[in-house]
Amino acid sequence: MAALVSVVAASMPSVVAPGTCSDFSDLREIKKQLLRIAGLSRERGLQHSGKWASELAFSLAPLPLSELPPPPPLTEEDAQDLDAYTLAKAYFDVKEYDRAAHFLRGCKSQKAYFLYMYSRYLSGEKKKDDETVDSLGPLEKGQVKNEALRELRVELSKKHQARELDGFGLYLYGVVLRKLDLVKEAIDVFVEATHILPLHWGAWLELCNLITDKEMLKFLSLPDTWMKEFFLAHIYTELQLIEEALQKYQSLIDVGFSKSTYIISQIAVAYHNIRDIDKALSIFNELRKQDPYRIENMDTFSNLLYVRSMKPELSYLAHNLCEIDKYRVETCCVIGNYYSLRSQHEKAALYFQRALKLNPRYLGAWTLMGHEYMEMKNTSAAIQAYRHAIEVNKRDYRAWYGLGQTYEILKMPFYCLYYYRRAHQLRPNDSRMLVALGECYEKLNQLVEAKKCYWRAYAVGDVEKMALVKLAKLHEQLTESEQAAQCYIKYIQDIYSCGEIVEHLEVSTAFRYLAQYYFKCKLWDEASACAQKCCSFNDTREEGKALLRQILQLRNQGETSTTEISAPFFLPASLSANNTPTRRVSPLNLSSVTP
């Protein structure tokens, strides 16, 4: 575990979010609270909330026997319902939800009433999923509804108005409202649930799924509790506010949760979201050493391996997860990624469909399936898959971006523009979204907007190093030769400063344009340097040789380089052939096209 903590510490920013440490002054008391809520969650069949609390409690120092929390006291109603509750809980644990609900009917205690209502809710969900698998393909899952939801809403609403619901009851009421697409009411109920029972992680998590932006978060009246820090870290990650999220997680590590695998996995996910692939891979690899049977977030790990084309590692991960549990959604997604990397797209789509049969609301599988249908040129199925992903989570920029790409293939630029804008709103500093927007504006002949997008893409850090080339070509199209030359120069400097192996066409295109530009400006030395660079590339070799012959001929005729025409800044000495001396002229001001 020490190795894992050191890897995370080395990856984290040094800034610590203010005002969080004072909330964690008594870690022993926090551990007691976590153990208590883990027990209460398990009693009500809330396995994921119980697991989260148990994992967090495990990361803290063990308590002596004298300080272990006592079991919750039984009320008179608990005693009366004990036999029915014990029997029903046994049925609930083996997923006989209707049977559990039958024996709990008429129970008065809060615990038994929650299990009664929750059993009815899960029974409806199970029937909905069974009907979906039996009758429909994976792309029509949204058409089947849980028939129990309306009845549950009526009954829970009456209890809510009478103020008879505890924190768990409010959580279930919020879930029912969310399932019925009553988002505003659901948010209010979840906020109320966090005030009454702040230790229940399930309510916080549901609230996370309903918040779409930071402004919405500001208007929420949340309880001032240490759980709020975990919630804020999680929602910042979801909203792509990665710097704030990492600061929150660092502060949680500093106050005593350094051994929490949950926090460490969230940090890895955060680095994945900002495409810091090396850090994310390093943390995930250490996490797997400490928790080798972990399945949560392994689909995210597989995405990283996929991006890096690490076939052996992805194959090992897929086989390993298959041995642990082949019927988990994460396992299916990892196997799908493996087949996708091998360009077996039909098999990949099959495994993503299998994941969706296991959990129709699993966001990653919908998005990945959309990608596979795109690879198979099945645009209508891709659109359906991406739309389902957005139904599950409107914050999924990949689905919005995927829809934009799909409509681009269908040559529908106005649709593209809408979807790329939505993706850009979610990822304002992602150059890929900006470049896509720029291309869209270009097709619609809105060239000023296209310029702004390309320049902004370069300014935020161009991942694919194409923004400057596209901006240069746009300037070429508008006969703005000096601006085009400046963009090409900056592009070449960026490519060579990264130490990348230059293989793609655009470098030769840049040298060819600059050679011709300097030739027109009668700057023979600079034109000669660029022309000689052109000779290094197959597609521009002949043009480079021809230009060199022309320059030599003009020089022999007594033509001299001009000193009156101002040119943009020039190639670094290391790139100039034979270290030809070049003038240094101030770069042109591109602020006119900066958004």
Image (spheres, rainbow, N blue to C red):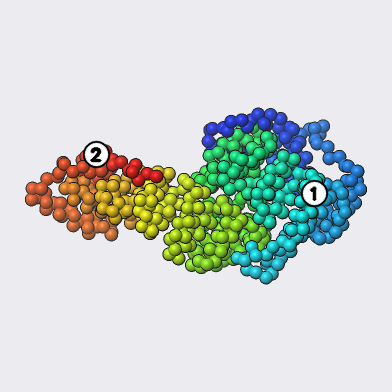
Residue 531, image x and y in percent? 22, 52
Q: Secondary structure at mark 1?
A: helix
* Badge nearest the viewer, 2 or 1: 1
Left or right of 119: which side holds 461? Answer: left
- Front position in the image: 135 or 318: 135
Q: Is residue 306 visible?
A: no
- Res. 217 mark: none
Residue 538, image x and y in percent? 28, 59
* Residue at figure coordinates x 44%, y 60% from the top left: 414
Q: Mark 2 or 1 closer to N-term?
A: 1
Residue 400, image x and y in percent? 52, 56
Instruction: Quickly name the residue at label 1.
Output: 159
The quarter of the displayed image where residue 567 is located: top left
Compared with residue 501, is residue 256 higher up or lower down, i.e. above or below? above
Q: Residue furthest left?
A: 557
* Residue at figure coordinates x 16%, y 48% from the top left: 522
Left or right of 574: which side holds 259? Answer: right
* Residue at figure coordinates x 69%, y 62% from the top left: 145
Q: What's the CA distance linking mark 2 and mark 1?
A: 76 Å
The quarter of the displayed image where residue 460 is located: top left
Q: Secondary structure at mark 2?
A: loop
Hey, what amino acid is under mark 2? Val
Residue 252, image x and y in percent? 63, 35
Instruction: Quickly name the residue at label 2.
Output: 585
Compared with residue 267, is residue 158 higher up or lower down, i.e. above or below? below
Q: Residue furthest bottom?
A: 135
Left or right of 72: which side holds 452? Answer: left
Left or right of 389: which side holds 63? Answer: right
